[in-house]
Image (cartoon, rainbow, N blue to C red):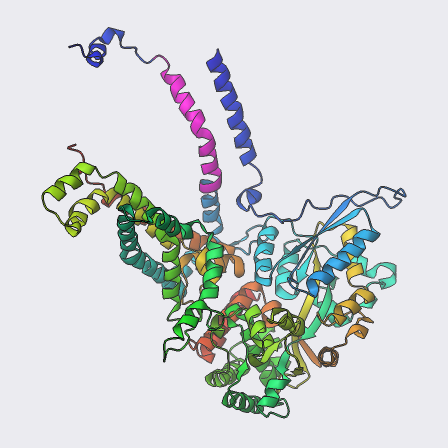
């Protein structure tokens, strides 16, 4: 009798285990869950009672691991929570590469965060195609387009596909050369270069003065890709990339091969810091921020990131900015801009409170504070009043007067192709590929991925 | 003299014919069931799903629709980078077998003896194994830093006159050696521990007999210790080869398979295609190829390396 009870109990326990092991296949095999709590559920009633509105949780993932971004975002969240006691905002902060990794696992299980960092372009397009983002065009157009009209049209379009928005920008700028004025003065370079030849000459001068000319984090691959893509833009103009992308041209067109050749000219001068081939983006910013290199090609995030990564947390004392030089014989003009920015993508399960919070984050006042902290270039009208750093003002003006704007290649292109682009260009730096091979690899990927 | 055992055996009619055979089997089955269920759900089922996805060109979001058949496999076997990855994996395997295992064996013999501070050395030799791979990778990335003011190894190297700071993890020629150093540092403790356990199972009488016969230390090691450790050595070779073939964490964090694929192994290749480029169909195909390679090795090894029965006569 006791044996029968024992067998029965064992059977029940085992069945319980077996049933708990069953479940949707996707969640069984992908065990990673966001660190934040359960997703928001229902929207509160329109006529909420004066006290208890239903509790809502918002999950927000961003990549500002250091100050000022880290504290500023937290401040906004705290202010919003104070004004809306029924809302809890859970922030998950991740470093850039870790964020990309973690987001992909969460995407595959179909539970994207409510608000998360996005760069728009091909990556976002594949998320939209999989139905993981929420269409917020109605929210933008509500009240006669009240929210929509606060944004600059260009930046807002980066987060749209076929006229529908799935996210909003909070920062949009351009990539350019940031330089240490003190080191330039030490090498007796009076003015920043305006042509490619001048840039190469300045590199030689800096080397002769015992200063490392350029800081580059080619371990992460995309910093080196920026130099190549700007060279392609200066040589072939925006038309070259547009043609290649539309498949009327090809990535083996002369502009792209010559871009590789010009880049090889620079690499041959050995202008980078030791170990650059394995250096991460943070290490690149640290090298520049610590005054160990004279220049770096970076975006509008450079001032805040290089000072955050510097040993003294202050970074370069006299920071300057100059536009990517013209390449002699190229058809590109100095007002062609390669850049990008940051935005908030809205997950498909986001509650109306989440969208309201994003409106709060992109209000003119919040944007002014963001600009004043040097985190980026505001995209909301009135935000630029907060820009105090003269370099950032220069960036913002260059950006707003651009004749052509190209989102960074590796973001604009489909993810698989962006990765091929980055990997192939690293071959130029390591000396294992020729310009022709790099162009061909990118073209092969394009044939497969751009349909 | 009555021998109780024999008395019981010689009375067949009182030999209880096992009364509850079916119930015994049922008990066994029920006890195995939870582990078996987990095995099916987390090991067998994903393998079949991988097999399914490997026939598609799929970006991981939404259902798989683009059927490409065996195209993925064809691409894998003709891709230079994959072949390089297999080569690098084999390099790590060979180096492990040639350097790491003998080193662990030597250490275990030394630590097994009656030396002062023995327990202390055992502890510190085992400590690297206890660290997580991620922490290990980050520590060694700092140690290998090309800047002498930040990297300990370069700081020591530049003290030698005429030696330039090395770029280690950024140099395609040095990166495999650096990765191997970290792998050895991490895992020699485990092998040492296994050998120590194996050493303790060698009967004292044999060693004493050898000493009486006048064998010196080296002869003892060669003719007694190693043959009698053969079971343990088999185990450590097996663990080492499979671990080397599937190594991912350390390499990905330290170099991401770079620079320019210099430290690429099969697992980093699979991860890059699967989760960086979002080509999960291709990534699944790579995973299956890895599975086949490891399976082939396992079967061949278990078949060929049967343990000789040295202690059967005792």
Name the residue rendered at 44%, 27% in the picture: B31
Q: Relative to A61, does residue A264 appear above or below in the rendering?
A: below
Image location of residue B175, percent across then percent down: 40, 67
Q: Give the percent coordinates (x, y) of residue A445.
A: 51, 68
Q: Do we see residue B70 in this rendering?
A: no
| Main SS class of the magenta portion in the image | helix
> Looking at the image, which residue sits at the far left?
B213
User: At which x and y percent is residue A109?
Assistant: 60, 48
Q: Residue at x 82, y 61 (%)?
A: A141
Across and down, in percent, residue A194 comes to: 63, 90
> Relative to the observer, which residue lies in front, A118 or B142?
B142
**Does residue A153 belong to the magenta stretch?**
no
Figure label count = 0
Asked if residue B11 shows in the view, the reply is yes
Is residue B165 rendered to the left or right of residue A190?
Answer: left
Relative to A16, does residue B8 appear above or below in the rendering?
A: above
Horizontal placement of A299 versus B199: left or right? Answer: right
Left or right of residue A98, residue B235 in this image: left
Image quadrant occupied by the C terminus of chain A: bottom right
* Residue sitting farthest toward the front: B116
Residue occupying the point 27% across, 10% down: B15
Q: Give the answer, above or below, for where A421 lies relative to A434.
A: above
From what the image shows, is residue A355 above or below residue A314?
Answer: above
Can residue B39 be found in the magenta stretch?
Answer: yes
Q: Give the range drawn in magenta.
A: B19-43
Which of the pair A149/B124 is nearer the observer?
B124
Q: In this view, does A289 lie to the left or right of B107?
A: right
Q: Which of A349 and A100 is in front in this view?
A: A100
């Amino acid at each position: 009798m006791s044996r029968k009870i024992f067998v029965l109990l064992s059977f029940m326990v085992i069945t319980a285990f077996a049933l708990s092991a069953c479940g949707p296949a996707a969640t069984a095999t992908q065990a990673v869950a966001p660190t934040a709590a359960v997703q928001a559920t229902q929207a509160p009633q329109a006529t909420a009672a004066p006290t208890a509105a239903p509790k809502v949780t918002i999950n927000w993932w961003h990549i500002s691991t250091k100050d000022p971004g880290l504290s500023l975002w937290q401040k906004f969240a705290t202010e919003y929570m104070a004004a809306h006691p029924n809302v809890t905002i859970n922030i998950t902060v991740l470093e850039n590469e870790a964020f990309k990794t973690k987001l992909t696992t969460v995407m595959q299980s179909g539970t994207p965060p409510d608000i998360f960092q996005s760069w728009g372009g091909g990556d976002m397009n594949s998320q939209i195609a999989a139905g993981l983002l929420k269409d917020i065009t109605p929210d933008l157009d509500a009240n006669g387009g009240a929210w929509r009209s606060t944004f600059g049209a260009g930046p807002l379009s980066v987060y749209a596909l076929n006229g529908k928005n799935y996210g909003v920008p909070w920062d949009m700028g351009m990539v350019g050369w940031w330089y240490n004025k003190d080191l330039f003065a030490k090498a007796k370079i009076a003015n920043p270069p305006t042509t490619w030849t001048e840039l190469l000459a300045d590199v030689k001068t800096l080397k002769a003065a015992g200063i490392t000319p350029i800081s580059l984090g080619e371990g992460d691959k995309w910093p080196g890709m920026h130099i190549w893509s700007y060279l392609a833009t200066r040589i072939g103009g925006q038309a070259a990339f547009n043609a290649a992308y539309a498949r009327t041209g090809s990535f083996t067109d002369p502009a792209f091969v010559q871009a590789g050749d010009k880049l090889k000219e620079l690499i041959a001068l050995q202008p980078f810091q030791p170990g650059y081939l394995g250096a991460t983006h943070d290490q690149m910013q640290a090298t520049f921020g610590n005054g160990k290199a004279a220049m770096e090609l970076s975006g509008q995030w450079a001032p805040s990131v290089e000072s955050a990564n510097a040993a003294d947390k202050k970074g370069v004392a006299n920071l300057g900015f100059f536009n990517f030089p013209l390449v002699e014989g190229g058809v590109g003009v100095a007002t062609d801009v390669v850049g990008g920015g940051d935005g908030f993508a809205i997950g498909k399960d986001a509650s109306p409170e989440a969208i309201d919070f994003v409106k709060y984050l992109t209000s003119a006042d919040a944007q002014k504070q963001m600009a004043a902290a040097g985190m980026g270039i505001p995209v909301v009208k009135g935000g630029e009043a907060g820009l105090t750093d003269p370099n950032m003002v220069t960036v913002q003006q260059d950006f707003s007067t651009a004749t052509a704007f190209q989102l960074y290649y590796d973001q604009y292109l489909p993810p698989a192709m962006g990765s091929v682009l980055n990997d192939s260009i690293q071959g130029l730096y390591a000396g294992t590929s020729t310009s022709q091979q790099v162009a061909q690899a990118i073209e092969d990927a394009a044939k497969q991925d751009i349909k | 003299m009555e021998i109780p055992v024999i008395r019981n055996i010689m009375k067949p009619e009182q030999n209880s014919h096992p009364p509850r055979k079916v119930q015994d089997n049922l008990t066994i089955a029920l006890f195995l069931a939870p582990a078996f269920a987990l095995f099916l759900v987390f090991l067998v089922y994903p393998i079949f799903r991988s097999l399914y996805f490997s026939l598609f060109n799929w970006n991981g979001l939404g259902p798989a629709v683009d059927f490409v058949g065996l195209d993925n496999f064809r691409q894998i076997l003709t891709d230079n980078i994959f072949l390089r990855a297999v080569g690098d994996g084999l390099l790590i395997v060979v180096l492990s077998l040639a350097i790491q295992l003998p080193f662990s064996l030597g250490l275990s013999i030394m630590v097994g003896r009656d030396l002062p501070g023995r327990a202390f050395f055992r502890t510190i030799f085992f400590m690297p194994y206890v660290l997580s791979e991620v922490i290990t990778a980050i520590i060694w990335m700092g140690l290998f830093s090309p800047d002498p003011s930040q990297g300990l190894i370069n700081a020591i190297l530049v003290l030698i006159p005429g030696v330039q700071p090395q770029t280690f993890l950024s140099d395609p020629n040095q990166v495999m050696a650096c990765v191997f150093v970290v792998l050895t540092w991490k895992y020699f403790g485990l092998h040492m521990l296994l050998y120590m356990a194996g050493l303790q199972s060698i009967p004292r009488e044999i060693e004493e007999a050898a000493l009486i016969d006048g064998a010196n230390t080296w002869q003892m090691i060669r003719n007694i210790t190693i043959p009698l450790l053969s079971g343990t050595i088999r185990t450590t070779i097996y663990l080492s080869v499979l671990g080397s073939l599937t190594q991912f964490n350390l390499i990905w964090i330290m170099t991401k398979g770079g620079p320019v694929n210099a430290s690429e192994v099969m697992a980093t290749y699979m991860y890059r295609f699967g989760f960086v480029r979002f080509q999960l169909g291709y990534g699944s195909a790579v995973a299956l190829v890895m599975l086949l390679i490891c399976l082939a090795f396992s079967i061949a090894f278990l078949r060929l390396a049967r343990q000789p029965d040295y202690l059967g006569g005792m």
